[in-house]
């Protein structure tokens, strides 16, 4: 059985091992940094800071048969402050026309912008390669567990939720937009700049072009990457769009990956959050996958996936050997289908 819960200190070794299997900026291959992230997350779950930007929530998926963490996802309660702005490139268009030669063009433009009162950000989703495409929908569980938590505690987050998607990279693993703009003005590698920007964004405002950048002047490969997602990210894009997220016409200033947003209250799983009593029952053809939250004295947050059906304000949950919910418990659940 797989459960989803808040991260705890004893997860350090598993998360460090997971970081060796994938490259992901939010799960660095540095045990001390991971340990610091775990401590910060524990504080956020136990007693959230009134300053939302200080709150980071890390969720893990644990395979109970192996007592091993096999995936992770994260929420940053506020991304973008006076001290650490959220930077983006706005994507707009400008019409140009000459009556003299009866010729006109529509030019795409990019312009650096920043937000000092940013939204809540979801990100940091990593699945152990061994558990991908296994039928457990682990990636979707790790994605939706964040919505389940935000639905339970909406006051801990901003009214709007933000997600940044990865663009296509070239066959050498480079971001075409970075090669066309970032490298020319910042004089460093993409990954070096990305890591530096996590702790210090001053160099972006100081060195990045502040005026309009006409896409026509960029290489074709860079133009084609703006606002697009890579093949591996297409399922994430489709999932976000299916639950209410929309493209903001803003992209990452480094790689051109698109930014998506949705009001927290309008996110489909949160709008349809179930809260009430439950009844164990035999599985039937009408049941769907649900992510179910129950109280657990060992964790600040605990949930698991099960087949269930809502009828007459009651959640009918498939009977399983692992299902151990006190009969008088109130459950909270969101549909994964």
Image: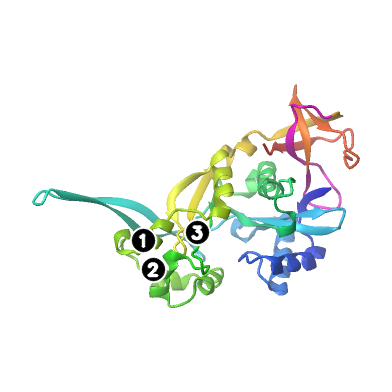
Q: Is residue 294 one of those drawn in magenta?
A: yes
Does any portion of residue 96 appear in the rendered image? no
For residue 318, side relative to residue 108 (left or right): right
Instruction: List x then y, in percent, for residue 63.
Output: 82, 54
Q: Quadrant of the C terminus?
A: top right
- Give the number of the disc on residue 168: 3
Q: Earlier in the sequence, mark 2 or mark 3?
A: 3
Residue furthest top as drawn: 312
Q: Nearer the viewer, residue 18 or 11?
A: 18
Residue 309 falls in image quadrant: top right
Q: Secondary structure at mark 1?
A: helix
Q: Position of residue 249 (x, y in %)?
A: 42, 50
- Where is 268 relative to 81, above or below? above
Could you tell me which secondary element the residue under label 3 belongs to?
loop
N-terminal-most mark, 2 or 1: 2
Which label number is shown at residue 250?
none
Residue tagged 1? 220
Q: Which residue is mark 2?
A: 180
Q: Which residues are magenta?
A: 283-304
Query: Distance of mark 2 from mark 1, alpha carbons?
Result: 10 Å
Residue 84 rendering spot, x and y as whole percentages: 51, 65
Label 1 Cα neighbours within 10 Å, binned few <14 / some 14-19 / many ≥20: few
**Mark 2 → mark 3, Cα distance in angstroms:** 14 Å
Residue at 49% from the left image edge and 69% from the top image edge: 201
In the figure, 286 relative to 259: above or below? above
Q: Is there CB contact under 8 Å for labels 3 and 1?
A: no
Secondary structure under the numbered disc 2 in the rendered image:
helix
Q: Nearer the viewer, residue 289 or 171?
A: 171
Label whose residue precedes the other's in the sequence (3 or 1)? 3
Provide residue 276's location: percent of width, then percent of height.
77, 31
Q: Does 334 appear in magenta?
A: no
Would you say 296 lies left or right of 289 here? right
């Amino acid at each position: 059985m797989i459960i989803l819960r808040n991260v705890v200190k004893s997860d350090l070794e598993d998360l460090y091992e997971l970081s060796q299997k994938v490259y992901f900026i939010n799960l660095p291959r540095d045990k001390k940094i991971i340990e610091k992230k775990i401590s910060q997350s524990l504080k956020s779950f136990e007693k959230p800071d009134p300053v939302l930007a200080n709150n980071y929530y890390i969720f893990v998926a644990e395979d109970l048969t192996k007592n091993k963490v096999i995936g992770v996802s994260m929420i940053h309660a506020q991304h973008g402050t006076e001290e650490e702005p959220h930077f983006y490139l706005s994507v707009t268009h400008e019409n140009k026309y000459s009556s003299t030669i009866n010729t006109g063009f529509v030019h795409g433009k990019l312009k650096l912008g920043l937000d000092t009162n940013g939204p809540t950000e979801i990100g940091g989703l990593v699945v152990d390669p061994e558990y991908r495409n296994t039928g457990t929908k682990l990636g979707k569980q790790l994605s939706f567990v964040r919505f389940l938590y935000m639905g339970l505690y909406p006051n801990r987050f901003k009214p709007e939720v933000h997600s940044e998607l990865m663009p296509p990279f070239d066959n050498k693993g480079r971001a075409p937009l970075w090669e066309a703009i970032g490298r020319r003005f910042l004089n460093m590698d993409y990954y070096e700049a990305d890591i530096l920007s996590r702790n210090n964004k001053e160099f972006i405002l100081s060195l990045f072009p502040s005026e309009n950048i006409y896409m026509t002047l960029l290489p074709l490969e860079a133009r084609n990457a703006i606002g697009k997602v890579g093949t591996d990210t297409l399922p994430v894009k489709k999932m976000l769009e299916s639950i209410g997220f929309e493209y903001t016409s803003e992209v990452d200033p480094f790689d051109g990956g698109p930014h998506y947003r949705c009001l927290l209250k309008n996110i489909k799983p949160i709008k349809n959050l179930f809260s009430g009593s439950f009844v164990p029952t035999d599985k039937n053809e009408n049941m769907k996958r649900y992510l179910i939250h129950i109280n657990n004295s060992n964790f600040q947050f605990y949930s698991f996936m099960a087949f269930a059906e809502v009828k007459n304000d009651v959640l009918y949950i498939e009977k399983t050997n692992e299902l151990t919910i006190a009969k008088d418990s109130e459950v909270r659940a969101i549909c994964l289908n």
